[in-house]
Image (tube, rainbow, N blue to C red):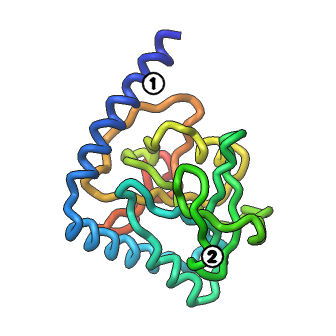
C-alpha cells in the first residue's frame, strides 16, 4: 500500500512541476512549437486512415491545424466524448471542427449524433500528456481516461509533447503502457520501450 501511495505522491509532484513549466511557455513560443508539431505530424499522416485526436485545453499542444489538414486530404478524424460516469472515452468522427460543442470539463466534443468509432485496428491515436519519458511512458492529468481506453483498445499510439517537457524517466505503475512513437517540435522518435 505504501508503495502505491509513494507513486501517487510522486506523480502529483511531477504533475505540478510540469504544469508550471508548460504554463511558462510564452504565447509566441507556443504558437511556433504547435506549428512545428503539426509539420512533424503531417509527415506521418499517411500511416493511418483513422486518426483519434484531442481538443487542446490548459495550454496543451494545439493540433487543430493538423486536424484540418487530415480532413482536407480525406482522412477520418475523431475526437473523444468523456463519459464522466464511467471515466471512459467514446470517439466520434467529425466532418468539420465546426461540429464541436462544449462538453464535459468544458472541453469541445463531437455531438452524440456523430458516428462512433467501433474498430480501432490500424487507427492512430494521439495521446495527450503533460510529459513523456524516453521509454514512452506518460504523465497526464490523473483521471485515467486514456489509460482505460488503451487497456481495452490497441490503436497505434503517438505521444505528443513539447521537447522541453520530455523527461528521462517518469514515475510509472504496472498499468502504464508506453506509446509507439513520440513527436516533439524536433520530429519523430521511437521510445526505448517500443524498440
- Vertical comparison of 131 with 45: above or below: above
x then y, percent, for residue 33: 28, 69
x then y, percent, for residue 51: 61, 70
35 and 20: which is toward the camera: 20
Q: Which residue is mark 1?
A: 8
Q: Earlier in the sequence, mark 1 or mark 2?
A: 1
x then y, percent, for residue 135: 42, 45
Q: Number of callouts in the render?
A: 2
- Vertical comparison of 47 with 13: above or below: below
Mark 1: few/some/many CA within 10 Å (<14, 14-19, 20+) = some
Q: Please indicate, yes or no, whether residue 124 appears anywhere in the rendered image.
A: no
Left or right of 179? Residue 29 is left
Left or right of 63? Residue 113 is right
Q: Residue 114: which disc?
A: none
122 and 26: which is toward the camera: 26
x then y, percent, for residue 106: 52, 55
Please give the name of the residue rendered at 20% of the width and 70% of the height, measured from the top-left corner: 28
Amino acid at each position: 500500500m505504501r508503495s502505491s501511495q509513494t507513486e501517487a505522491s510522486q506523480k502529483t509532484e511531477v504533475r505540478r512541476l510540469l504544469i508550471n513549466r508548460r504554463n511558462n511557455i510564452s504565447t509566441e513560443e507556443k504558437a511556433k512549437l504547435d506549428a512545428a508539431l503539426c509539420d512533424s505530424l503531417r509527415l506521418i499522416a499517411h500511416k493511418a486512415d483513422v486518426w483519434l485526436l484531442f481538443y487542446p485545453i490548459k495550454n496543451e499542444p494545439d493540433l487543430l491545424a493538423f486536424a484540418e489538414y487530415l480532413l482536407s486530404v480525406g482522412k477520418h478524424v475523431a475526437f473523444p466524448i468523456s463519459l464522466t460516469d464511467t471515466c471512459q472515452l467514446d470517439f466520434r468522427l467529425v466532418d468539420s471542427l465546426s461540429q464541436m460543442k462544449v462538453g464535459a470539463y468544458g472541453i469541445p466534443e463531437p455531438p452524440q449524433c456523430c458516428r462512433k468509432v467501433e474498430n480501432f485496428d490500424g487507427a492512430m491515436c494521439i495521446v495527450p500528456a503533460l510529459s513523456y519519458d524516453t521509454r514512452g511512458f506518460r504523465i497526464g492529468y490523473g483521471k485515467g481516461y486514456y489509460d482505460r481506453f488503451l487497456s481495452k483498445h490497441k490503436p497505434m499510439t503517438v505521444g505528443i509533447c513539447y521537447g522541453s517537457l520530455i523527461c528521462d524517466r517518469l514515475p510509472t505503475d504496472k498499468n502504464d503502457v508506453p506509446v509507439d512513437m513520440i513527436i516533439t517540435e524536433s520530429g519523430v522518435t521511437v521510445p526505448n520501450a517500443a524498440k
